[in-house]
Amino acid sequence: LSQFLKYCFENRYIDSKPVFEKLPTVDHREKVYLKQNEVLKLSKASSWDYNKKGKANFTSNTHLILIKQERKGKRAGKVGKTLTVTNWELYKDVFLFQCSLGCRFGDIKYFRVKHFHNNIKDGYFSWTQSKTNDPVTVPVNKISGEIYRKYSRGKTQEQYLFPPLTSQKYNKGLKNIFKALKFNRRLSLPKQV
């Protein structure tokens, strides 16, 4: 824009050269995060989970839908040919998995069963970040281990760990989950400097 206006002034399309005022910058040092008790509350929330009897509580929540993903591994016959979860259960598990590994949503979409190495007690996850192409290795913890077991059972190494998910539906779903759990503490807005 500056170059265009300079050109206009030099060719006498405008009478004076405009002066731009500097816009205020935003201080982003304050981070927004979930507290430990909020993460625990989220991990224990199960009212919208698809239970072992093949039911979810759809009467109290009209936002719930079932999501199914085919299992193609050798053990699929023992654990069921199809993984079935509710959308809110998937959003919750993906969010907790992200929190426990510290990875972006862009990486979650491409997570495969093969990204886990060793055994479930002292194993680790390794992947290449999609944004930076940097390799990452993170040790397994209780939350990531439980979620990995839940979504990897009966799948081949090449199958995606989680069913397909769009960022728009994921973000809207998380908003609804946090509202349902009454995560409504006041956050301060970024300060303009």
Image: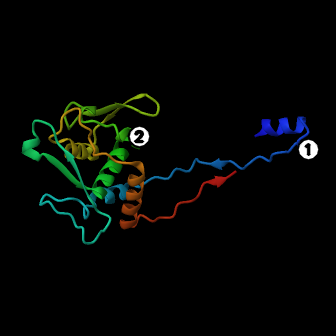
The answer to whether residue 163 is seen in the rendering is: yes
Figure check: 156 above or below 145: above
Write down the residue under mark 1.
Answer: 16
Task: Compare residues 26 and 88 and report the one nearer the observer.
Answer: 88
53 left or right of 103? left
Mark found first going from the N terminus, 1 or 2: 1
19 left or right of 171? right
In percent of the image, x 35 and y 50: which residue is there? Answer: 95
In percent of the image, x 35 and y 41: which residue is there? Answer: 108
Q: Residue furthest bottom?
A: 60
Q: Quadrant of the N terminus?
A: top right
Write down the residue under mark 2.
Answer: 106
Figure check: 136 above or below 75: above
Q: Position of residue 102 (x, y in %)?
A: 39, 41
Q: Position of residue 175 (x, y in %)?
A: 41, 60
**In the structure shown, which secondary structural element does the residue marked by tag 1 occupy?**
loop
Mark 1: few/some/many CA within 10 Å (<14, 14-19, 20+): few
Q: Amino acid at mark 1?
A: Ser
Figure check: 88 above or below 98: below
Mark 2: few/some/many CA within 10 Å (<14, 14-19, 20+): few
Q: Amino acid at mark 2?
A: Gly
Q: Position of residue 156 (x, y in %)?
A: 18, 34
